[in-house]
Amino acid sequence: MTFNNLLKEKTIGVISLGCDKNRVDTEKMLAILGSDKITQDQEDAQIIIVNSCAFLESSRKEAIETVFEVNELRKTGKLEKIVLTGCMPQKFVSEMFDEFKEVDVFLGTGDYEFLPEAIELAYQGERVNFVGKAKEFKEKKRVVTTPLHYAYLKIADGCDNHCTYCLIPSIRGKYRSEKEEDLLAEAQSLGDVKELILVAQDVTRYGEDINGENKFVELLQKLSALDNIGSIRILYCYPDKLTDELIAEIRNNDKIIKYLDIPLQHADPAVLKRMNRKGTGEGYLALIAKLRKEIPDIAIRSTFIAGFPGETEEQFENLLDFIKEAKFTNAGFFAYSREEGTSAYRLPDQIDEKVKQSRVKKLYAAQKKVSGERNKSLVGKRIKVICDGVDYDKQSFFGRAYFSAPEIDGKVYFTYDGEIQQGEYYDVKITKADAYDLYGAVTEV
């Protein structure tokens, strides 16, 4: 039996862990498999592929625990082979291959195209390590796994910023922009998409690795010109690349959602310097003020790390004060994770885990107050909401306003006596709010 025939006989399950960038890789991997026997029920799967993240110790732990859980299906289900792909084997396969016997096939971030060959060898009795067999992943076709009305577009891979806490450059390599023509073709292939979400480790650096010239604004303009794209959401913008030209494009382009995710990570200048991050809290506040002046009602999201090595109580208080003053629409906070292989791993004055967690709680409490006040100000108002689905536990539809990205921000729960279509927009009158979510009813269709 050839592998193509073998694959047609096998039911395949896929588990995608980590970020939305990893999800896009998973969708391209599904296209390579070309199987019409993909299942969402793991107990029916004969092959399960776990596409892993390795950014933090917690994400590596999640990947390992997922494999252990899946492996139990060898006893109770139909499972025959486990494949581990993505960032974790890319970085750690030399430590894992001999010990992690539960896995039959290992492939890295650039090796997905070898899935058919690797699985065939596994069925011939081999344990396969194809990590590093390819330099990069070039597949353009996708099997979209998000709801049909939104999709992600990964415009670049890798990173050149070399933040001292981050493993991404050592896992994903240098920053590599996708070709403009490939991105436009990929976006067109997605069909009618109400919301196209642009992702990369740093979207604002797009094109600079090709000829030294930033092409992000040009890419936004060309994607906006596509008839099948309803709107564009921008994630992961580095503050030093939010130029006047880009701000003007976001302001003036009706297809661009007035929302930016700007991962700042800290506000104290000394901590930022140790992180190898450009900027200061004062400069960030000036940027936020500028964005709000140029683009009224813009939603700004960010992420921050608490407990970075050497972070004093005063430096933490500087960050806490910054959060209160910046008044982000949404923000995420993480305790510093000491990652072997990063520059920060060797820094002195590592901070106790309990102190780190305590600081994270204080940051969330400050942001909760900011978010709660903002949400309460929306009670009694009508806002435009796209329907993402139904929450049967709450007996309610749910969706998002422009100021919320899928999966990471709050939801709008709403009711309506008539028929609702997923992916359509509705005017919802807000009747109740908490710190994260809004509640209301459709007032007109």
Image: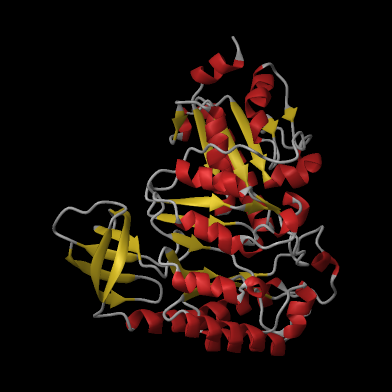
In the displayed structure image, the side of residue 167 where residue 408 appears, left or right: left
Instruction: Give how far across and how far down residue 355 sits, in percent.
Output: 67, 77
Badge count: 0
The colour scheme is: secondary structure
Q: In this rendering, is residue 312 above or below 108?
A: below
In the displayed structure image, the side of residue 193 where residue 84 appears, left or right: right
In the displayed structure image, the side of residue 69 where residue 336 appears, left or right: right
Who is closer to the viewer here, 64 or 417? 417
* Residue 178 seen: yes
**In which quadrant will I find the C terminus?**
bottom left
Q: Which residue lies furthest to the top in this view?
A: 1
At 51% from the left and 70% from the top, the residue drawn is 249
Q: Quadrant of residue 262 in the image?
A: bottom right
Q: In this rendering, is residue 181 above or below 428?
A: above
At 66% from the left and 82% from the top, the residue drawn is 267
* Residue 309 seen: no
Instruction: Give how far across and how far down residue 158 sits, in percent.
Output: 70, 53
At 65% from the left and 85% from the top, the residue drawn is 283
Who is closer to the viewer here, 393 or 175? 175
In the displayed structure image, the side of residue 269 where residue 8 appears, left or right: left
Who is closer to the viewer here, 165 or 96? 165
Instruction: Give how far across and how far down residue 128 sits, in percent.
Output: 73, 28
**In which quadrant will I find the N terminus?**
top right
Instruction: Give how far across and how far down residue 71 sits, in percent.
Output: 59, 34
Q: In this rendering, is residue 424 above or below 250?
A: above
Q: In this rendering, is residue 117 above or below 269?
A: above
Q: Which residue lies furthest to the left in this view?
A: 417
